[in-house]
Amino acid sequence: MKVYYPTFYDKFNCRASRCAHSCCRGWEIDIDEETAKKYLGFPPPLGERLRDAIAFDGETYSFRLTGDGRCPFLNGAGLCDIIAERGKDALCEICREHPRFYEFIGDSELRGLGLSCEEATALLLGEKTLRFTDGENEYDLPALIEKVAGKRMPRKATFSPPSHPETLRAVLELFSKTEPIDEMWTRELDELRRAFSTTVRAVRSFAPICERAAYERIFQYILYRQLDRIGETSLPRLTRYAAVSACFIFILDACGRGTAQAARRFSEQIEYSAENTQIIINGILGNTAQI
């Protein structure tokens, strides 16, 4: 199997206590069965804490989060007590692998870093161009798609800053249909829709000064993450999904969220939910005039 990944992939290092948006809070944390059984057999005192903190619903093991949604092993310094006592090798699979993702097309494996992670987003935004490698050769996205899927990207597959009010309204309406990850997501979208004239002015003012190259990388990377769907969804449709998603990030950015934060919020809300991703993919059909 041939493995492909962005050239910044190997530069990733977790920010740990320096991360403002820790993946150790605000997420459900499932534990793979092998690790859960290992945890349940740990000797005290760590073993006692683990046994008290692990829930089992008959199918899945998970950590019981604290009242404020934190992993019970995330300490006051923003570090993991399991790593502190047993090292990184003691982590369960999801904690060990996040934010890495692995997708497959035929006999090709596509690896990457999810943009819900602020370090992954910083790495993408820090690149001058988005390139991929198999460890020997480098490819731009169109070349990679042709190599692994035998398809050519549409000629006009590029990011263009949105400006038409109906486009902006349609994008906000579409994203408002997704299942919210938290209350803040709903409030943010409600605010953008309620003060729509202000949103339009902000987007139009931002378009001439935005970093177009950064948005082209964001657009292409969003498309890259969904390439495993190419067997069930056409490449033009996936390309539109990526364009609409980049458009949504652009709106958040124009309204003061900042490029990195806007991309991160999009990713944690949409890309980590197969249902929400499908809502966006399905929603772009029938909206050709607006989106």
Image (cartoon, helix red, strand yellow):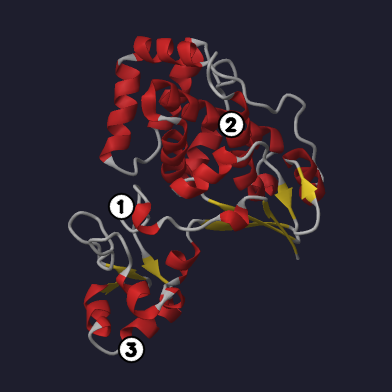
Pick the quarter of the image with the N terminus.
Answer: bottom right
Q: Nearer the viewer, mark 1 or mark 2?
A: 2
Question: Hey, what amino acid is under mark 1?
Answer: Gly
Q: Residues within 10 Å of mark 1 (few under 14, many from 20)?
A: some
Q: Residues within 10 Å of mark 2 (few under 14, many from 20)?
A: some
Q: Name the residue located 26 percent from the left edge and 81 percent from the top edge.
A: 46
Q: Which mark, by number, is residue 26?
A: 1
Seen in the picture, residue 151 relative to 200 is either above or below; the reply is below
Seen in the picture, residue 202 relative to 187 is either above or below; the reply is above
Seen in the picture, residue 249 relative to 114 is either above or below; the reply is above
Classify residue 102 by image quadrant. Answer: bottom right
Question: Hey, what amino acid is under mark 3?
Answer: Gly
Q: Are marks 3 and 1 in contact (CB under 8 Å)?
A: no
Q: In this rendering, does residue 223 appear at all? A: yes
Classify residue 106 by image quadrant. Answer: bottom right
- Separation (CA) of disc 1 from disc 2: 28 Å
Q: Determine whether the residue tagged by mark 3 lies in a helix, strand or loop.
A: loop
Q: Position of residue 76 (x, y in %)?
A: 22, 61
Question: Hey, what amino acid is under mark 2?
Answer: Ala
Identify residue for label 3: 41
Q: Name the residue located 48 percent from the left edge and 16 percent from the top edge.
A: 206
Mark 1 or 2 closer to N-term? 1
- Separation (CA) of disc 3 from disc 1: 27 Å
Identify residue for label 2: 214
Give the camera-side residue of 278 and 217. Answer: 217
Q: Position of residue 83 (x, y in %)?
A: 37, 73
Mark 3 or 1 closer to N-term? 1
Q: Name the residue located 36 percent from the left edge and 63 percent from the top edge.
A: 29
